[in-house]
């Protein structure tokens, strides 16, 4: 019996109003359950557009996408119950404390009482924020905000977790804590869909990657296999530059 993929994308197009070229130009992709999947590419390649369509934030111009066998658009309410989303921008209330933020977000996912309190306490402890639980988020450092942003996205223990640049602009210690936690989460069964510009991190973190450029998937596979199959690349960053070029992408 065939196993249902975590993500199934079929001929997906997205053109923004007033744009000459499509942001997504007919991408197709299947991501098995249990992977740490890296969606990589230069600025403007279509990474965030893809994530936003899969999460139901944007509507595709054409094509189909499924999450765990559920169709985007038709089954979006069911999809929202099984996914977690950690956006690139900090999605927290700066005037609330960490505990107040997590209590509010947890209750939106249907968590209440001792279950919610225990999950908040455990998460704050894991991410080194327990002693700062009653401080307002506006007083947090960038790394602390990133860690709390991640906690907010995994409060309900999602089956599939979307991460858009989860470690951007933070210190090495915070990045290490986040990556180690995500590896453990994946080992427990959560499929992770991840975008990043940190190619060295992606090379060692991701079990499978696809590189997008100009709205198209130009290569996909397991990082080590792709490096070995492309002579002269040596690592993922060199391969990335070989495929996408060195021209600056300002968007």
Image (cartoon, grey):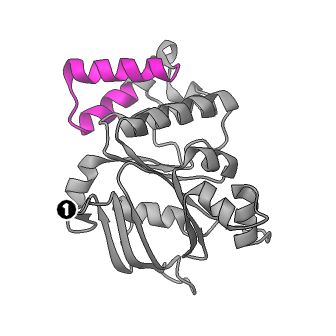
Q: Nearer the viewer, residue 94 or 28?
A: 28
Magenta span: predominant SS is helix
Mark 1 closeness class: few <14, some 14–19, many ≥20 residues within 10 Å: few
Q: Position of residue 139 (x, y in %)?
A: 58, 25
Is residue 16 rendered to the left or right of residue 199?
Answer: left
In which quadrant of the rendered image does the N terminus lie? bottom left
| Looking at the image, residue 44 lies above or below residue 146 | below
- Tally of numbered tags: 1
Q: Is residue 144 above or below residue 87?
A: above
Vertical side of 48 occupied by 179: above or below? above
Residue 220 highlighted magenta (yes or no): no
Residue 120 in the magenta stretch? The answer is yes
Quadrant of the image containing the C terminus: bottom right
Q: Quadrant of residue 101?
A: top left
Task: Judge whether residue 57 can be spotted in this image.
Answer: no
The residue under the point 37% across, 62% down is: 54
Q: Residue furthest bottom?
A: 20
The stretch in magenta equals: 100-128
| Image position of 175 (left or right of 131) | right
Q: Which residue is mark 1?
A: 1
Q: Position of residue 206 (x, y in %)?
A: 54, 49
Would you say residue 219 is visible in this rendering? yes
């Amino acid at each position: 019996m065939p196993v249902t993929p975590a993500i199934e994308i079929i001929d997906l197009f997205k053109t923004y109003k007033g744009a000459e070229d499509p942001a997504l130009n007919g991408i197709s992709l299947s991501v098995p359950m249990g992977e740490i999947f890296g969606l990589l590419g230069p600025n403007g390649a279509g990474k965030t557009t893809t994530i936003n369509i899969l999460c139901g934030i944007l509507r595709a111009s054409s094509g189909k996408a499924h999450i765990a066998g559920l169709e985007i658009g038709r089954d979006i309410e069911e999809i929202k119950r099984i996914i977690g989303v950690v956006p690139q921008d900090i999605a927290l209330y700066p005037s609330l404390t960490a505990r107040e933020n997590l209590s509010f977000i947890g209750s939106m996912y249907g968590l209440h009482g001792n279950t919610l309190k225990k999950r908040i306490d455990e998460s704050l402890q894991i991410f080194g924020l327990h002693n700062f639980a009653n401080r307002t988020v506006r007083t947090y450092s960038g790394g602390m905000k990133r860690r709390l942003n991640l906690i907010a996205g995994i409060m309900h223990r999602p089956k599939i977790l979307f991460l858009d640049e989860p470690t951007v602009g933070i210190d090495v210690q915070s990045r290490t804590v986040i990556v180690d936690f995500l590896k453990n989460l994946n080992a427990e069964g959560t499929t992770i869909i991840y975008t990043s510009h940190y190619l060295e991190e992606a090379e060692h973190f991701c079990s499978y990657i696809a590189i997008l450029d100009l709205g198209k998937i130009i290569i996909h596979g397991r990082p080590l296999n792709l490096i070995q199959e492309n002579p002269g690349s040596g690592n993922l960053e060199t391969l990335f530059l070989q495929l996408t070029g060195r021209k600056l992408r300002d968007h």
